[in-house]
């Protein structure tokens, strides 16, 4: 069972993670709730999980490999540089999802001592038809409006394996730190 305050906490942490992980060069990022997948037209998704003994949170970032999305993920390229190859484009989208989910993972680590994160997987959006099989107690969809870029979407699904309860102080809505590269 996921308590209402834990649901609000997952929501606050994911929104903060998306805002900090998707912003680039000071560009604004607006994140808002979307009622269903019906508005989401993107045909590819990046899937990452954050898991503990009590829950599995699945963060999904939807994208379309079109010219606008490619341009946004290549916005820092030098003038005259060749266009992104498909593999490099997918790597950049996956890394963006990784940064956002990594911030979520770090923040959840403050409440749950044993939290781990998967590597990003890119699959077709059609796989979301089977999301109900995960028996998630929390599913929420988000619209991500990127200043000067495409509008993307995200979904958070949380399956619980016990009582999940934590509280994120709403007055501490500062941006979640996306962290730095760690060498092991």
Image (cartoon, rainbow, N blue to C red):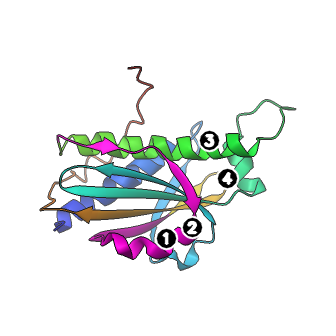
Distance from the alpha carbon under mark 2 to that under mark 4: 21 Å
Q: Quadrant of the N terminus?
A: bottom left
Residue 133 magenta-highlighted? yes
Q: Earlier in the sequence, mark 2 or mark 3?
A: 3
Label annotation for residue 149: 4
In the foreground, 99 or 26? 99
Label annotation for residue 92: 3
State which quadrant residue 66 falls in. Answer: bottom right
Distance from the alpha carbon under mark 3 to that under mark 4: 15 Å
Label 4 secondary element: loop
Q: Is residue 81 left or right of residue 176?
A: right
Are there few (<14), some (14-19), or many (20+) residues within 10 Å of tag 1? Answer: few
Distance from the alpha carbon under mark 2 to that under mark 3: 18 Å
Label annotation for residue 125: 2
Q: Position of residue 174 (x, y in %)?
A: 34, 43
Mark 3 or mark 4: which is in front? 3
Pointer 2 and pointer 4: residues touching (CB < 8 Å)? Answer: no
């Amino acid at each position: 069972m996921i308590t209402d305050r834990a649901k609000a906490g997952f929501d606050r942490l994911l929104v903060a993670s998306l805002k900090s992980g998707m912003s680039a060069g000071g560009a604004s990022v607006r994140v808002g709730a979307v009622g269903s997948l019906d508005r989401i037209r993107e045909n590819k998704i990046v899937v990452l999980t954050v898991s503990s003994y009590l829950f599995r949170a699945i963060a999904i970032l939807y994208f379309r490999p079109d010219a606008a999305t490619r341009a946004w993920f290549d916005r820092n390229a030098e003038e005259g540089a060749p266009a992104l190859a498909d593999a490099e484009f997918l790597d950049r989208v996956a890394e963006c999802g990784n940064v956002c989910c990594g911030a979520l993972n770090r923040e959840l680590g403050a409440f749950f001592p044993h939290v781990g994160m998967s590597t990003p997987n890119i699959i077709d959006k059609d796989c979301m038809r089977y999301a109900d099989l995960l028996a998630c107690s929390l599913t929420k969809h988000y619209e991500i409006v990127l200043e000067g870029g495409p509008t993307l979407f995200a979904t958070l699904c949380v399956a619980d394996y016990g009582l999940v309860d934590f509280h994120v102080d709403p007055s501490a809505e500062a941006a979640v730190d996306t962290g730095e590269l760690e060498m092991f």
